[in-house]
Image: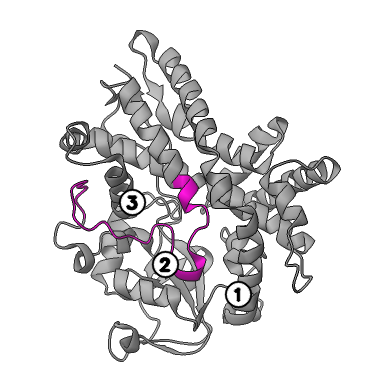
Amino acid sequence: MEFSRPMVIDPTGRDIHGEAARIRERGPVTPVELPHGVPAWAVSSAPLLKRLLTDPRVSKDPRRHWQRWIDGEVSPDWPLYTWVAVRNMFTAYGTDHTRLRTLVSKAFTARRTAALRPRIEEITATLLDRVAKAGAEGLAVDLREEFCYPLPIQVIGELLGLPAELGAELRVVVDGVFHTSADAAEVADIYARFYAVLGELVAAKRAAPGDDLTSALISAHEEESGTRLSEQELLDTLMLMISAGHETTVNLLDNAVHALLTHPAQLAHVREGRASWDDVIEETLRAEAPVASLPLRYAVEDLPLGELGGPDGAVIRKGEAILAAYAAAGRDPQQHGPDAAVFDVTRASKDHLAFGYGVHHCLGAPLGRLEARVALPALFDRFPGLTLAAPAGGLEPVDSFISHGHRSLPVLTG
């Protein structure tokens, strides 16, 4: 399979679903060009992508398996540099990944997640009061700004024990990580500022440990082997948990509200008991994947795709990069039928890969779902007349081809 006529990915993400459809039209796997001309293979077939995500011949470690990185062709001014340069379980492979995920999972327990529910309910209620106040006298409210964004960022902040004074800076730097059309100066600035925030957080928790995830990660280790998170792995693990731990949930809430307000019949299914809020959440994750495309994976050896259910004779060569096209796979007609692009909460099968699959399945998925299970019914119960305050087609997308949501979500609370 030759890398020719690549489809150039729009780094601003202006038309996520249109671009995803064009990727699918070119076949289950197609060459694409990422910012700065970086080549990759975009996989849009849900079954093929699932197999690749679990294949041991596919790695997330660029230092060992991405030829372009090994050859020194990836510079720190690349907008996606942070996504591949960090040292945490997101970019680890084999025994390194097992070690890091084990250390993190010991701190990120189901008990800790479940215990957050009362606090999530409290935060939700407070934010809804704020929305009501902002929407008094028929004024439009930016629901992303006033509700969808602050809920997850406050939850992850409390989970990590983040000092309140770092919150504003944290938001800026996380937004910067997802800004995939940033220039060199912006990339360098965000990279430095993020590590400065993380350094302050770790220093504070070393001085005064608490019952929080940061303190747990600082002390996390495998007693049998005596290994421990290195300082760089600690900082980069916190970076992963902060960025992934809130951005996906922000977009999940944003996209779910938008989908229900633009599909009133689907909202009626929920209100009249024909579908549940879990149905809304899973269908949103399928049809409006909060992470549209996730960089990057790499072929450890030549991958004959015919062996994996892909095109016969097609091969991704050793050292080449793979882009998981989640938005395209979520609407794959071969997986979900000819109406795959339709948002339908009564759909029998809502299978999706929005939280990844296999060994890299998102550890924070249960928390994201929990936040949505609390926030969405609370929002629509509090404001039964909620409506969009702007034409649905006129809403600005998030400035990213990775993050899929809206820059603002103006609503009338009714």
Residue 132, located in which quarter of the rendered image? top left
Percent position of residue 28, x then y: 29, 74
Q: What's the magenta region?
A: 341-368
Circles 3 and 1 in contact, beta carbons < 8 Å: no
Residue with the most extreme top position: 137
Percent position of residue 325, x then y: 38, 64
Query: What residue type is disc 3 on?
Result: Asp
Q: Is residue 204 above or below residue 81?
A: above
Query: Element at badge 2?
Result: strand
Query: Residue 355 lies in magenta, yes or no?
Result: yes
Query: What residue type is disc 1 on?
Result: Pro
Residue 254, located in which quarter of the rendered image? top left
Q: Is residue 280 left or right of residue 240?
A: left
* Labels 3, 1: front one: 1
Q: How is the image coloured?
A: one colour
Name the residue at 22% across, 58% down.
349
Query: Residue 48 lies in magenta, yes or no?
Result: no
Classify mark 1: residues with Cα within 10 Å, few (<14), some (14-19) or many (20+): many
| Residue that mark 3 sits on | 15
Q: Is residue 360 left or right of residue 142?
A: right
Q: Is residue 159 above or below residue 165?
A: below
Q: Nearer the viewer, residue 197 or 221?
A: 221
Give the mark nearer the N terminus: 3 vs 1: 3
Query: Element at badge 3?
Result: loop
How far separated are the C-alphas under marks 3 and 1? Answer: 29 Å
| Residue that mark 2 sits on | 324
